[in-house]
Amino acid sequence: MAYSREIYDAAEKVLSKRRKMAEDDAENRRNEFYKSCPRASEIEHKLASTAVSTAKAVLKGGDTASQLQKLKEENLGLQQEYSHLLAEHGLGTLEPHYKCEICHDTGYVDGKMCSCMKELMRSESYRRLNALTSLSLSTFESFSLKYYSEEPRKGRPCDRDIMRSTFRYCVSYAQKFGLDSPNLIMTGGTGLGKTHLSLAIANEAIKKGFGVVYASMGSLTAKLENEHFGRESGTGAMDSTRECDLLILDDLGTEFRTSFSSSAIYNIVNTRLMLKKPTIISTNLSINEMIAYYSERFASRIIGSYRRIAFVGRDIRQQKRMQDE
Ligand SMILES: [Zn+2]
């Protein structure tokens, strides 16, 4: 996976912080232990000096073997006493407790990048993609049905009833969200709450610890294009969108369409279908428009593998603006 220097540095920074925390904590535990148990501190000094005595004995020559044997026995005795004292004070070890047992928070093991470092770079990449959106503003609690009309409709439920079931579906989708959740396509005009409810789902999935990328189509395709043509340093946007646990593509059809962007979108959607990773797309486009804008192949992929969620009503932003006037 191609990540830029900044992403790499950000991950290194987190690791060195973790390392320092673990080492400071070990240092504190050691100091505490020696304060409450002066004998332990004494033993540590003795152990250090037996190491020096051993070296001296070897240098001096003479009956080295028996001298060394004696030192070794002393040493063992001291070490045993030390572990007894540790146990008495309810301490197992004074070694640092690293967050990652495999690499001791260095990020590398046997010259290879550790999985914890990869994980850090992945989440940093998501964070940067998501920084483009105000993710925390839209929640289920802040969604209101009052903007949807209760006026009876011929042959179908009123707007509010349709939106109530859409809302309930989204809440339960978020509650039950997992890697086997279905793909959704949210359809309907501008300002009907598609962005709001998809953001609310994103928030819930993030709270559950899933790696979520939320991308508005306009900024995503610009970013992909810039990274692809080397105009912007790589943040792994393409890989992140393909591999995250949940991808939300907001406002399909509003992006600046080029042959590059169309094939990039197809590629992302298709790869995620193959990897069986859930995606949520929101769009104002009808199926016919989708065929005209992209391709029949793309539209049929969406129809065949996405569950359609309908949004109806009158533009909420417009209603709010009129209320304010
Ligand atoms: Zn590690």
Image (spheres, rainbow, N blue to C red):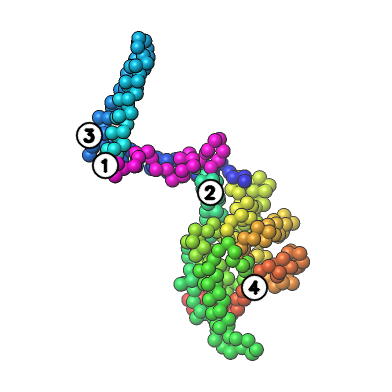
Mark closer to the chain start, 4 or 3: 3
Mark closer to the chain start, 1 or 2: 1
Is the C-beta separation of discs 4 and 2 under 8 Å?
A: no
Of 7 and 102, the residue lying toward us: 102
Q: Looking at the picture, which amino acid does disc 3 mark?
A: Pro
Residue drawn at x 32%, y 18% is 53
What is the distance, in whole Å, between disc 3 and disc 2 at their CAs? 43 Å
Residue under numbered circle 3: 38
**At numbered mark 2, what does the secondary structure look like: helix, strand or loop?**
helix
Q: Residues within 10 Å of mark 2 (few under 14, many from 20)?
A: few
Is the C-beta separation of discs 3 and 1 under 8 Å?
A: no
Question: What numbered label is drawn on residue 119?
Answer: 2
Is the C-beta separation of discs 1 and 2 under 8 Å?
A: no
What is the distance, in whole Å, between disc 1 and disc 4 at their CAs? 64 Å
Name the quadrant containing residue 98: top left
- 107 in the magenta segment: yes
Q: Looking at the picture, which amino acid does disc 2 mark?
A: Glu
- 159 in the magenta segment: no
Q: Is mark 2 within 8 Å of ligand 1?
A: no
Q: Looking at the picture, which amino acid does disc 1 mark?
A: Glu
What is the distance, in whole Å, between disc 4 and disc 2 at their CAs? 33 Å
Frontmost of labels 1 and 4 is: 1
Residue under numbered circle 4: 308
Residue drawn at x 54%, y 35% is 110
Name the chief secondary structure element in magenta: loop
Q: Looking at the picture, which amino acid does disc 4 mark?
A: Arg
Residue under numbered circle 1: 88
The vertical placement of 40 against 208, above or below, is above
Region in magenta: 87-114
